[in-house]
Structure formats: C-alpha cells, structure tokens
Image (tube, grey):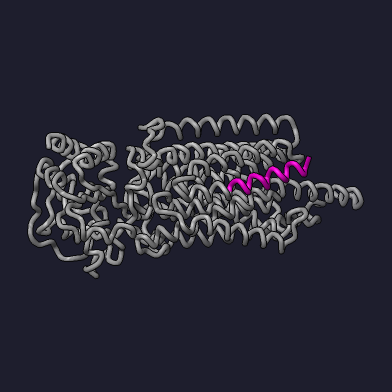
Amino acid sequence: MTLVIQFSYFAAALLFILGLKAMASPLTARKGIIWAGVGMVIATVATFFEPVIVGTTNYVLILLAIAIGGAFAYVTAKKVAMTDMPQMVAIYNGLGGGSAGLIAAVSLAKAQRELHTVAQDEAAAVAASHNLPMDAALRLVDAGSIGAWMGIDVAILALLGAVIGTVAFSGSVIAWAKLDGRMKRNKLVSGHQWVNIALAIATVLLGIWVFFAGTGWPIFLFFVAAFLVGIFVTTPIGGADMPVVISLLNALTGLAVGFKGYVLGNPALIIAGIVVGAAGMLLTHLMAKAMNRPITNVLFSGFGASPDAGGEGPEGEMKEVGPDDAAYMMGFAEKVIIVPGYGMAVAQAQHKVWEMVELLEEQGVEVKFAIHPVAGRMPGHMNVLLAEAGVPYDKIFDMEEINAEFASTDVVLIIGANDVVNPAAKTDESSPIYGMPILDVDEADNVLVVKRGRGAGFSGVENHLFFDEKTRMVFGDAQKVVNGMIQTVKTM
Amino acid sequence: MIEGMTGVIAIYVFMLSAVAGYEVISRVPVILHTPLMSGSNFVHGIVVVGAMAALGMAQTPLEQALGFLAVLLGAGNAVGGYVVTERMLEMFKTSDKDKKQGAK
C-alpha cells in the first residue's frame, strides 16, 4: 500500500511539472491545467490511505473541511469577473500560505504536547522514587526543547515554513483588499520602515525562543509576529507594484509548501512547492524587470508614495476630436495598432473594441494589439481580457515583438493607457518612470488617445505625447467612445 | 529528516525541483504570465495533502481545530486556483481556428 501511495505522489509531481510546462504555450495551456488537476486528484485520493491518518473523527473532519473549503472556493471562483482576476489569484494564494502556516502550527503544537507528556512521565517517576510532591518533581525534570525533540533540521524547516506561510497569508489578504478597492490606505503607523524591521527582528527572536522552548506561549506569539509582518510589509505597496508582490507571495507560498514537505516527509509537497517557488521567483524577477524597478524598490518604496512627480510642465495644448473623426482616421488607414490599458479594462470596453476591430478589418485595415508588460493590473492580465472578448491571441503582440512596427504604422489608438506610452521614460531623467521600457507609440504617423479626462496617469506624470502635434485626444468613457466609433465605421 | 531520504538527497531534490521550476517559466510569453501565475498558484494547492496528513495525526482538540482550518484553506487554494486558471485558459484561441467551437 505504501508503495502505491508513494507512486501516486510521484505521478502527481510529474503531472504538475508537465502541466506547468504545457501552460507555458497558448496552444497547450488548457491541457496543462487539466494534467495538473488530474495530478492533484491522484495525490489527494492517495492521501486518504496514508497510515498516518488515524481515527474516524479525523477522517470525518478531513472530508468536512475539503467539502466546505472546496465548495466555497468553487462558487467564488466561478462567479468572479475577468477584470477581478488578480485579486482572486491573490486570495487563493493566501489560502495556501495560511494552510502551510497552520500545518506548521499543528506540528509545533504536537511536539510541544509530546514534550509535556515526556516531562510529566519523568516527573512522576522522580516523584515516586524520591518521595517528592509532583510540582517539585516537575521542576527537577529537564523538559527538553522543541528543536531537539523534532530534530534540528526538521524544526528549522518547520519554523521557516511557518513564517513564510503566515506572511504569505496575511500579505495576500492585504493585497486582495487593496486590489478589490476595500483598502485604500498606504500607511498604518508613522515610521513604517522601522516598524517593519522591529517586527522582522521580533519574529526571528520568537522563532529562536520556540526552538529552545518546551512550552506553548512562544509558539502563539511567534505566529502573531509573523502575521503582522505580512500586513506591515504589504500595506505601503500600491498600484503597478501590486502584481509583483502577488507573484512574490505566490513564490513564497510555494517555498513554504516545499518546506512543509520536508517536515511531513512528503515528496509531492517538496517537488510541487519548490517548483512553484522557483518559477514564482523568476516570474517576479521578470515582472520587476519589465518595469525596470529592482524588487527591493518595489518592497521598500511605494510607487504612489512619491506624490510629486518630476519633469517640467507640458508645452502646447491637447487637440480634441470626436469619436467619429477618430473612426474615419482609422477607417482610411492601412495599418492600425491598438494599445489597451487599464482604462479599457475598467470601462469593460474590450468587447466593443474587438467589434470595432472586426469592422475595420472588413474595410481592409490591418489591426494589431500591442501589450506593454505591465498593462492592466498583472502581466498578461490584458491578454486575458482581450481573449475574453474573443480577440485571437495571434493578433496580440508583446512590446518587444511590435516596437519596431510603430514607425510603419498609420494610426495608433491608445485606450486608457498613459504611463506605458510616455516618452518621458526615455528622455526625461528627472521623471519617476525614467528607464521604464515603453511602447514606441510616438514613432507612428498619428496617435489617437481615448481618455476619461485630462488628468495625469497612474504615476502622476504628465505625458508630453498627449500634447504632441500628431496626437488627437478623444475624451470620454472608453465603452461609449468606442461605441461611437463603431457606429461611424459601420457607415463607411 | 525524511524516512529513507538522507540530507544530501533532500538537497538534490530541492535543487532539481528549483531548476525544473526555472526552466518551465523561462521562455513563457508575457500573454501567459497571469494564467501561469494562477496555475502555479493552483499547484501549491498540493498543500492540502500535507494538511490532511497533519489533521490525520491530530490528537487534541487544538490540533484538530488547527488541522481542520489547514485542510479547509488548502482545499480552497486548490479548487479556487484550478477554476480561475481554467476559466482564463478557456479563452485562448487562434484566429485561423475559425471553426467557432462555442465561440463567445
């Protein structure tokens, strides 16, 4: 039986790796998640036959917990809108981290209980042989430490997993609350940086205390401190840095799960956890690089935290046109590139945009979509939104693939994007976004910008491109504006 | 540490898993970053298996309560992660595949 269980874990680990590999290409992606799903089912079913699981009550509790947790997650995951995906990814990640933290809590509580029993037995023996009262005997007995009882390596991994998992849990909850618009504040106390450092040190010290302790209190305080670290580290982070943080928390949960695998002696947990941990670290790095922000900047200085953006005020004025004029420009062009941004996502305009593109293509216009790595709220989130509207993925291009094409493009239509097309990132060293790679929209012959108002973008930086000679502004809600364009294109 | 697994082997497993994770992601197009992040999020839902073992070993009400919560959260991670990833990946299709199978 043990062999069958072990083989099931092996099969699950293999399916996870193959599944993730398949998910790395749009053609095989769906197969990938199904393989990984099969692996998960195999591993879960096999675990029911684990000899370590004892007692009918425990079996009932396991089934009950899976039913409740699974059903709740299923319903919420089915209901959520595509635009709200990032915060859902954050919250499900947080659940995994919390689970890893709680597993550590169980093993630490178990070690503590066993130590207590051993001490009681020894004290009883001493009390009997020396004719002492029990409480005096207890004082004579060395209770031993959790670290020695669990084994030094296992104890350290259990404690590490506990910290990482708990931080991932509370951090993810904050990330979810922020992305969901439930939490706006970026500051909990003054001197945030110092509080973070103090909490981190406290967590480490409490961890060491737990290691050498034989009682329960340090364990509780240790988890409280780790929980607070997650909250305090995540709170100051906002906006475009959020996806990087979610990716980092995702990697951390993977790592915590891997460490739990060592503690529980389960290779499926080790392999799946470490694979996700490594993949997540790389993904985090790629995202941070796409914004040209070192990960330390993301963690220790909020984007929104620098209120006054540098750079001198724009010269010239914005030239406004109506949706109909804009539609004519595109209808008579040979090649149009659309740059969607968060503004399009908020207005839920992606379906309308695709409808317009289909009409333009009937007119013989070549249309492509250009996606900046940080468009939307997560890398790839914009692609998901476009895919939801039915845009085939081979019409969607990464920044690196399409940047050279702007020079040969007649019209670029920017919908609700600002910072990702701001030439200041290339030219103005005083700008906070200086150095961030951008879409070279300014090289096209004409630029159309759909925007709700005249305000600056997310980073608070004015965009000189909007005041340029070849730029025309179409003010209004993206959904309404594009609808207007569709009506005009239909009449052409 | 792990029955039948010496410290050195444990480090090998760690290293090889890390390399596998790195390789899987290193050449991913940006358009798949979010689904892939969600997919890897689903994979660490395997934590539910560890939570089941932890709850299975529990002997006191405190341990059972903690273990119960661990399984509950782990199951939420796995199921939620799977459903959102599946929903996102469902949307990818090519334009030359114009057979319109259940087109939206």
Taking the magenta stretch, the answer to whether it contains residue A13 is yes
- The magenta span reads A1-16
Image quarter (top left, top right, bottom left or bottom right) of the N terminus of chain A = top right
Taking the magenta stretch, the answer to whether it contains residue A274 is no
Where is A458 relative to A435, above or below? above
Residue sitting nearer the eye, B26 or A153: B26
Residue sitting nearer the eye, A475 or A359: A359
Whether residue B50 sits left or right of residue B95 in the image: it is: right
Residue at horizontal 21%, vertical 58%? Answer: A408
Which residue is at the far bottom? A429
The image position of residue A78, as x and y in percent, is 44, 32
The image position of residue A230, as x and y in percent, is 48, 52
Residue at horizontal 81%, vertical 56%? Answer: A140
Number of marks = 0
Whether residue A471 sits left or right of residue A69 in the image: it is: left
The image position of residue A482, as x and y in percent, is 19, 39
Whether residue A193 sits left or right of residue A134 in the image: it is: left
Residue at horizontal 40%, vertical 44%? Answer: A86
The image position of residue A227, as x and y in percent, is 51, 50
Report which quarter residue A467 is drawn in: bottom left
- Prevailing secondary structure class for the magenta stretch in the rendered image: helix
Which residue is at the far right? A129
Image quarter (top left, top right, bottom left or bottom right) of the C terminus of chain A = top left
Q: Is residue A186 visible?
A: yes
Residue sitting nearer the eye, A436 or A198: A436
Q: Is residue A104 visible?
A: no
Report which quarter residue A434 is drawn in: bottom left
